[in-house]
Image (spheres, rainbow, N blue to C red):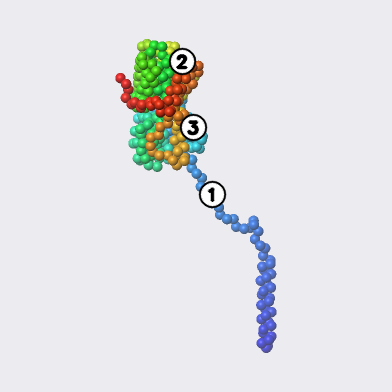
Amino acid sequence: MNRRSLYLIGAALLMLVALIVAGCQAATPAPTEEAAPEEATEEAPTEEPLRVAAVFPGSISDQGFNQAGYQGLLMIEEQLGAEIAYSENTPVAEFVQVYRQFADDGYDVIIGHGFEFGDVALEVAPDYPDTIFIVDSNPVVSAPNVAGITGQTWQATYLLGVLAGRMTETNKIGGIAGFDFPIIVAQMEAYRLGAQSVNPDVEVTNVYIGTFEDVAQAKEAAFAQFDAGVDVIFHIADAAGVGVIQAAEERGVWAIGWGLDQNSIAPNTVLSSLLFSGDLLLLQDVQRVVDGTWTGEVRLYGLETGVVGIAPFYGLVPDEVAQEIEQVKQDIIDGKIEVPYITEPTE
């Protein structure tokens, strides 16, 4: 076999192989979209809700201070999507224990509802540096992860003092408070100053009964003042304060409530009430946590913020008195009247 024959045979074999390969390629279908391997996708991490716990010294249904704070906690849940928890009627001896339990359970924010939680927060906070501690109704406490926040309630009680000073017929008015905490003393003293600003002859009797819960004791203290001639009485006594209003209704004298609008308790007796919007106060401060702007410092909210104010008069107060009080309110907002923060009871 010559070279020419070998060349022709090799060429023929190469062409045969090429045809076989081409046939295999033509017989293999192109992969469809369904057959294509799925690309692995990563799910976006689920953002954990803010966890907020509150400690209340009294009942969340006390129609006053604690109930207002509880409403704030519910607003935080509803408007900020937070997971909430609370302890109510918390004994003083258990304050620290409850704080630590909430912190150990991983709550991001712990709220102490009342001035008395300031020292507790300062004691516990260093052990939980990643937890935020808010103490409302406390205008003095602060630390890197502790803020004392409050409405300037003494501005509002000054207005209620003006009201009492104008409405008294005996020139004797009274006030009953649960404890002589500085924030409470400041309000009672502002009540005194407001009354004296419009009625220099008024006699003001303020007493501290040592309870926020004992309705009977509050009623007894109120009756003692009425027996001495008091015809307008103001309270800062939470649940016990209902007893003050009940006593005033029984004796037919004027009462002034605190925390929420308490006119519904005795519509013909309660002239007005100090409105402390603890709900707005707490919501605004926890909103700072959500926004990343929260800082450990004292924050005060005055009459101009709406956090503090006074309730309507429901036709029980003469128009000229109502107008005078509105003018005094504006003068406080404008800085023409400065209501001092007095922490020692006047003898």
Mark identifier at residue 43: 1
**Depth check, front residue: 165 or 92:** 165
Q: Which residue is mark 3?
A: 74
| Residue 156, quarter of picture | top left
Camera-nearest residue between 149 and 43: 149
Which mark is in front, 2 or 3? 2
Percent position of residue 221, x then y: 37, 16
**SS at badge 3:** helix
Quarter of image, res 169:
top left
Is residue 265 visible in this depiction of the protein?
no
Label 2: few (<14), some or many (≥20) within 10 Å?
many
Q: Residue at x 43, y 37 (%)?
A: 109
Nearer-N-terminus badge (2/1): 1
Task: Identify the amino acid type marked 1.
Answer: Glu
Against 290, is 196 above or below? above
Badge 2 amino acid: Thr
Estimate the x, y position of residue 33 in percent, counting from the top left: 64, 57
Instruction: Say if 175 sits above or below 341 in the image.
Output: above
Task: Specify whether residue 205 is in view.
Answer: yes
Residue contact at pointers 2 and 1, CB within 8 angstroms: no
